[in-house]
Amino acid sequence: MAAPVRARPTGVGRTTESPLPAVPGASQEEIRRQNLGAVLRYVHLHGPTSRAELTSQLGLNRSTIGALAADLVAGGLVTEGAPASVRRAGRPSLVVSPRSDRVYAHALSIDADRLRAARVGLGGQILDLREIPRLSGTSAIDAVRPLADLVRDMERSVAPDALLVGGAVAVTDTTREPDGRIRIAGVDETLGVALEAEFSAGPGFVTGDLADIAALAEQVRGVATGIDDVIYLHGDLGISAGIIVGGRLVIGHRGHSGKVGHMVVNPNGLPCGCGSRGCWETEISEAALLRHAGRNPSDRAAVAEVLRAAADGDRTASAAVAQVADWLGFGVANLVNVVNPDAVVFGGSLRDIFTAGADVVRERLDTMPLPASREYLRLRAAALGRDAVLIGAAELAFDKLLADPLNVGVAGQMDPVDPI
C-alpha cells in the first residue's frame, strides 16, 4: 500500500546545506545519518560537487566526506568520478554527482486550466513532462485519474533499476465553472483518498497549495535562493501567496493560509466570488486587467495581447496595466508591513503584470510601507515560470530522502559500515 497521504506539507521548506549542530546525546549513527543528509542535500541543490568543496562548505574533514560519499554511492544515490578538467598539479578531488537518471520523484500539478505530470530526477532535473487541458468545472478529485494515466504513461520508459522516492501534487485554489464563474477550492482531504486509490503501490504522495509549492521552488532554485523570508504572489484565475518565514512555509490551520487575494482593499469595489466585496483579486487579477482594457474578463488568452499592446504604447492597454499595478503595489505594501519579508516574488500572471508596471508598483512601495520594512526589500519576477510548481512539488517529494538517505528505498539496503 502507498504511504499515508498528508493533506498539507509539513516540515518542508528547509534549505539547510550544512550539518545541523549535533543534538546532545545523539548517537554516532544519528550523527552519521544527519551528515549523509547534509552531503546529499548539498549535491542535490548544487549539482556535481568536488569532495574538496563539500569539505569546505559542510565543515567536515576529508576522510569523513570520503566515507559519506562512498555510502551514498553504495546506496545508488550519487556517483563519483574524476573532474572533467584539472587546473592544478596534484591528485584531483573526486566529484560527487546526483544520480538524476536513476533516483526520481513524481511531481503533479492541478492548475487552473491544465493538468501536468513530471518525472523529476535527484538534483532537480525534469526528466519527462506530460500535460493535458483541464476542463472547466473539473474538481481536483476528478483530475486524479487523468493525472494517474499520465504517470503510468511516463513509467513505461523508466529503467527497471530506477528508484522512485515519492511524489507530490500542487493544487490551485481556484477553478472556472462551465458557466464562467470562478469557484474557490482548497486542498481537500479527500484528495489523498483518491490519490491512494490510484497509486496503491509506491511511496505515496503529499499534497499542497500551488502558491506554497511554487514559493518553495523559487526559494530553493529560483530568484529567492538563500533568502529566508519571502512572499511569493501567484496570479491566475485568482490570487494566492506562498509565505516563507525563517526558511519555512507558513501553512496555517489546516493549510488555509496565503489567501491574500481575499484581503479587502476597496470596500466599495466589486463583488468577489468569495462573497465579500472589494477583495484584492478583484483589482489585480487577470480579469481585472482585461476589464480595464475593455476586453472579455473570461478570455485568458487576451491577457498576453493586452500586455503586448501596453508595451507597444497603446493608451488603453497602458492605462489598464497602470491601474492594476497601482493596486498591486497597494496590497504588497500592506503585506510588507505585516510580514516584513526580504523579498516579494511575482509569479504566474502577476509576473508579467509586475514586469510591465514595475515603476508604478515601486511608487506605492516607496511611500506606503514603514521605512524599516521597505528599506532592504527586494522585488523580483519569478524565474522558474510554469515549471516552478513541478520543481517545488519534487522538492517536497525528495524531502524525506534528503532528511535520511539511509531510510528510503534501496538507500536503506546499504551494507553496514562503521559509523562516522
Image (tube, helix red, strand yellow):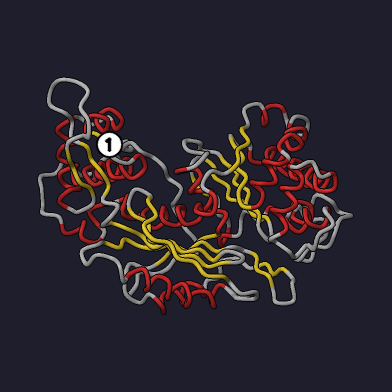
What residue occupies the far front of the structure in this picture?
A: 312
The residue lying at 50 percent from left, 52 percent from top is 388
Q: Quadrant of residue 113?
A: bottom right
Whether residue 347 sits left or right of residue 92 in the image: it is right
Q: Quadrant of residue 386?
A: bottom right
Whether residue 328 sits left or right of residue 50 in the image: it is right
| Count of numbered circles in the view | 1
Q: Position of residue 247 (x, y in %)?
A: 48, 42
Query: Quick check: 23 above or below 178?
Result: above
Query: Quick check: 347 above or below 92?
Result: below
Q: Position of residue 331 (x, y in %)?
A: 74, 44
The residue lying at 30 percent from left, 67 percent from top is 157
As shown in the figure, which amino acid type bears the numbered disc 1?
Thr
Whether residue 284 sits left or right of residue 379 in the image: it is right
Q: Which residue is mark 1?
A: 49
Q: Quadrant of residue 339?
A: top right
The residue lying at 75 percent from left, 29 percent from top is 366
What residue occupies the far right of the structure in this picture?
A: 268
Query: Is 83 in front, or is 189?
Result: 83
Query: Is 58 in front, or is 418?
Result: 58
Query: Is 262 in front, or is 315?
Result: 315
Whether residue 182 sits left or right of residue 220 in the image: it is right
Quadrant holding the N terminus: bottom left
Quadrant holding the C terminus: top left
Q: Position of residue 342 (x, y in %)?
A: 58, 34
Q: Position of residue 330 (x, y in %)?
A: 77, 42
